[in-house]
Image (cartoon, coloured by chain):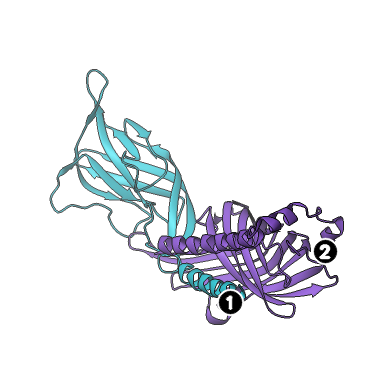
Chain colours: A purple, B cyan
Amino acid sequence: MRLILSCLFCSMFLSSAFAQLEGEQQSADTTTENRVKEASLPKVPKSFYIPTGLRLGTDLVALGVNAFGDRRNRYELQGDIDFHRFYLAGSYGIASYKIDESDFNYSNDGSYFRIGADVNFLKFDPDFNTLTFGLRYARASFTENLNTNIVDPIYGSYSESFTNSAVSARWFELTTGLRVMLFDNLYTGYTIRIQLNRKITGANEFRSYDIPGFGLSEFKNRWTFNYYLVYRIAWREKKLVIPGK
Amino acid sequence: MRQKLKFLTIGIILAGVFSCQVDSNCGSINVDYITFHLKSLNANGQEQNKTVKYDSIVSPQANMALYKPDSVIAIGAFSLPLSPAENVTDFYLYSANRVDSLRFTYEKINRVDSPECGIDMEFVGLDTVFHSYDSMIIVNDTLRRTVNAPNIKLFIL
């Protein structure tokens, strides 16, 4: 089921990406005249690399899970700043997770951050809508507790408590995201994250179960999804270069 | 263009939400028992399977006898559970003409499998502190379902 949905998800994403690229190619290659004009365009001025605004947002999926789930609590702040087509992006979040069952209870509490860069593939959008691909380095620090109350049919009942007091995890992410302007400076959109090469250190007393910002630690590689509501604080206008005009 | 982007966004959200749930099947490969094979050596020093008629097998840590057959039959392979409450388990194996004892130490690592499946335990680093057999080989010191070979070979010469 998960595999089928993942395939569906990837195909949707790829079709959208190609649609974007084709659209841009069509607008640029309509006539020979346009191609000549584009070829003769000046290089991007250095002033274009001066940031025009800061986008700050929060993950609505996390807020939804907080509201409707009873195990996980997560709050995430996400931001990026533009350098022409390149974005310096980062996020910081706090998260906790708990399971309360009759034979055991587990809890964790910690924070995480991601830092990286994106490239925007929507070159000439006056609303600053973006379709980005990027890389992230992510790190989480957390503590976790496990209390067991087991009844073994042969050896009887026993209780144990374990604490991993200073666990840290790191992983890398390949990301793609779309931001679409809803109203003036208010954007919405998703980020898909392919999380890779997860490594955990400091889980000495028991195996980590859940990593803030990553999810279940049994996976070394996985993918996840965020849906953001973002506000753009603009401090500078950029004169857009539109091919053929 | 914007309409298209909005539809795309909504579609991806729905796909993401429905595929986020991880299926759990409680299929752990870890087990809590040691598997034994009884062996002897022939004149050429080669291993041979051996069978013994055990009257009972007990552990002082357990609440009940681990093995107490209605009629005594010869067995050549058997498995005994380790105590999950401690890092040491003793076994006494009673047969008609002898009593053998074994003491194992090990490390137990807990892992949350899932809320539905509960706690999974890995028993690793199996070692013996004491045994009364003629010889013994620890073949696998990690208790896993997938390992075909026994954990322990007990030699009765």
- Out of B75 and B156, give the one closest to the viewer: B75
Chain letter of mark 2 equals A
Tell me if I can see residue A164 in this picture.
no
Q: Amino acid at mark 1?
A: Gln
The x and y percentages for residue A89 are: 72, 61
Q: Residues within 10 Å of mark 2 (few under 14, many from 20)?
A: some
**Circle 1 residues within 10 Å: few <14, some 14–19, many ≥20:** few
The numbered mark 1 sits on a residue in which chain?
A: B
Say which quarter of the image contains residue A237: bottom right
Res. A27 image quadrant: bottom right
In the picture of the structure, the residue carrying the numbered disc 1 is B3
> Residue A241: image x %, image y %?
77, 63
Kindly indicate the quadrant of the structure image that contains residue A228.
Answer: bottom right
Q: Nearer the viewer, mark 2 or mark 1?
A: 1
How far is the residue under mark 2 from the one under mark 1?
A: 28 Å
Label number found at residue A51: 2
Cβ–Cβ under 8 Å for marks 2 and 1 = no
The N terminus of chain B, quarter of image: bottom right
Query: Disc 2 residue type?
Result: Pro
On screen, residue B43 above or below A147: above
Question: In the visual, does B52 lie left or right of A214?
Answer: left
Seen from this angle, which residue lies furthest left? B71
Q: In x, y percent, where is residue A69? A: 53, 78
Label 1, secondary structure: give it: helix
Q: Is residue A224 left or right of residue A103?
A: right
Discs 2 and 1 share one subunit: no
* Residue for point 53% across, 52% down: A220
Secondary structure found at label 2: loop
Residue drawn 32% across the image and 40% down it = B150
Residue B16's x, y, as percent? Answer: 51, 69
Q: Is residue B46 above or below residue A180?
A: above
